[in-house]
Image: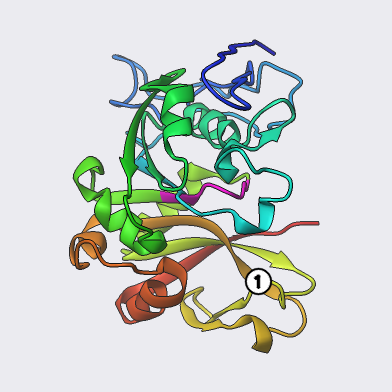
Amino acid sequence: MSDRTTSNGPGCSTRRCAGAGHARFTPGGLPQGATSLPVVPCAAQSDCGLPWRAASLPAAPCAAILAGGLGTRLRSVVADRTKVMAAVGGRPFLTRWFDSLEAQGVRDVVVCSGYRGHQIERCFGGAYGHLRLSYSPEQEPLGTGGALRHALGLLHGRDILVLNGDSFCEFDLEAHLATHTSRHASASLLLTQVEDARRYGQVILDGEDRVIEFREKAAAAGGGWINAGVYLLRRELLSALPAAQPLSLERELLPCWMASGVYSRWRITS
C-alpha cells in the first residue's frame, strides 16, 4: 500500500490501494498501433477485491457521486463529519469509490455534496490520483435526483455513471456500460441479491431484465433483487428535470422512467 495523508480535516488520511491506476477503460482509446491491452492484476494484496484488466471500450463515463445526505442515523458515531468522510480502515469511506473508479479508467468525478460538504473538498481538492474532482454543493437539500439536476453543468457525455456515496459495491464498469449500450437503455441499475429484502425494498424484473416494479420495503417479503446504488443514466433524462426542485431518484424518478426502459445488470452475493 502507498500512503498519501493530509491533515485538512477530520478523517482525512487518503491511503490508496497500490493497485489503483490500472485502467480497464482506456481514456482516448488504445495506444497507437495497439489492438488490445494485456490483463493486469491488482499490484497490491489489498482489500479492494477488484481483478483489474484492460478494456476494449474507448472511454469511461463521467461519474457523479451522491454525497449530500444528512447522515442522521450515524450521528451518534460520526458527529463531526459528513457520512462519506467516516473513517473506515483509517481513511475516508469515499476513497473506496475513488480507488475503484480510478482503477477502472474513470477520469472525471463530480461529488454532489450537501451537509458539511466543504470537508470533502478541503480534504481532496481538485484531484485524487488520476481523477479530476469537481464539486456541486447544494445550499438546500435537493434529494438524490435534484442533486443530479443541480450538477448537470459539470456532467458531460451521453451517459452518466451515478453512485450512492454512502455505500460501496464492487462492480464491472466495462460490462455494465456494454449491457446498457447494447440495450439502448435510458437507465440501467446494478442489482444485488439478498435473502431478506424487507430492509431495502425489492426490484421486480421481467424475463428480459427490464424493471417492471419497485416494491416498497413493507411489501418486499423474502429474498430477491435490491438496488445496489450504481446507475447509468442518459444525460437527457437529467436535463429534462426541473431545476432547484427536491427529487428522489429512487422513489420518484426511476419509477417514472420505467416506460422509457429501465434495465438491470446484476451481481450475486454469497
Can you give x and y, in whole percent of width and height, for residue 252 in the image?
Answer: 39, 76
| Label 1 Cα neighbours within 10 Å, binned few <14 / some 14-19 / many ≥20 | some
User: Is 7 left, or right, of 197 in this rendering?
Assistant: left
What is the three-letter code of the residue carrying label 1? Tyr
Can you give x and y, in whole percent of width and height, for residue 124 in the image?
Answer: 46, 23
Q: Residue at x 59, y 45 (%)?
A: 83
User: Is 204 left, or right, of 47 in this rendering?
Assistant: left
Residue 105 makes an appearance in the image:
no
> The magenta stretch spans which residues?
162-169
Q: Examine the residues drawn in magenta and state their main secondary structure.
A: loop
Q: Residue at x 26, y 44 (%)?
A: 155
Image quadrant for the C terminus? Answer: bottom right
Image quadrant for the N terminus? Answer: top right
Q: Residue at x 32, y 55 (%)?
A: 148
Mark 1 = which residue? 200
Identify the image's colour scheme: rainbow, by chain, secondary structure or one colour: rainbow
